[in-house]
Amino acid sequence: MRLLIGLADGQTVESVLLPRDGLCVSTQVGCAVGCVFCMTGRSGLLRQPWLVAGLLTYVIETFVWLRILSEADLSLAFPIASVNFLGIVLASRILLKEQVHRWQWVGAVLVTIGVAIVAGTA
């Protein structure tokens, strides 16, 4: 059994009752899984390329962070991680075209400096 929901822009989102008492509910137009019984899966992922890129980045970052934690002292690892605050603000500005106000920059820099100072005293 299938439920096809039409969106305002003409695209559709599909939900499918699976054969073994399961349910697949699409939360976006298209699907990257590619199930053969689902028309949404056959069309591939049509929207949200930033979602896929963000999830992939998150997975990579997790493995990098685990590697850093397994090989480096925490007094070095945490300042490296605090630079992530600056990277997020910079990526928000460049990739997502968000308005980043002066106080947001100041906050990210202060967090990074504060972690570096605390790590330097440890």
Image (tube, rainbow, N blue to C red):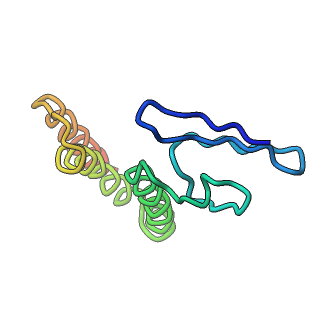
- Residue 52, quarter of the rendered image: bottom left
Is 79 situated left or right of 13 in this image? left
Residue 85 vertical position relative to residue 52 in the rendered view, above or below: above
Residue at the spot 18% in from the left edge and 42% down from the top edge: 97
Is 107 rendered above or below residue 62?
A: above
Compare residues 59 and 79 and report the one nearer the observer: 59
Residue at far front of view: 10
The residue that appears at 18% across and 41% down in the rendered structure is 109
Nearest the camera: 93 or 76?
93
Residue 50 drawn at (x, y percent): 37, 51
For the point 46% across and 60% down, the residue is: 56
Which of the 4 image quadrants contains residue 10? Answer: top left
- The answer to whether 121 is drawn above or below residue 59 in the figure is above
Identity of the residue furthest to the left in this view: 102
Q: Nearer the viewer, residue 74 or 5?
A: 5
Q: Quadrant of the N terminus?
A: top right
Side (left or right) of 122 relative to 30: left
How many numbered marks appear?
0
Where does residue 67 sit, x and y in percent of width and height?
48, 68
Quarter of the rendering containing residue 93 = top left
Residue 6 position in % (x across, y down)? 54, 34
* Residue 59: image location, x then y, percent: 50, 60
Residue at (51%, 67%) from the top-left corner?
70
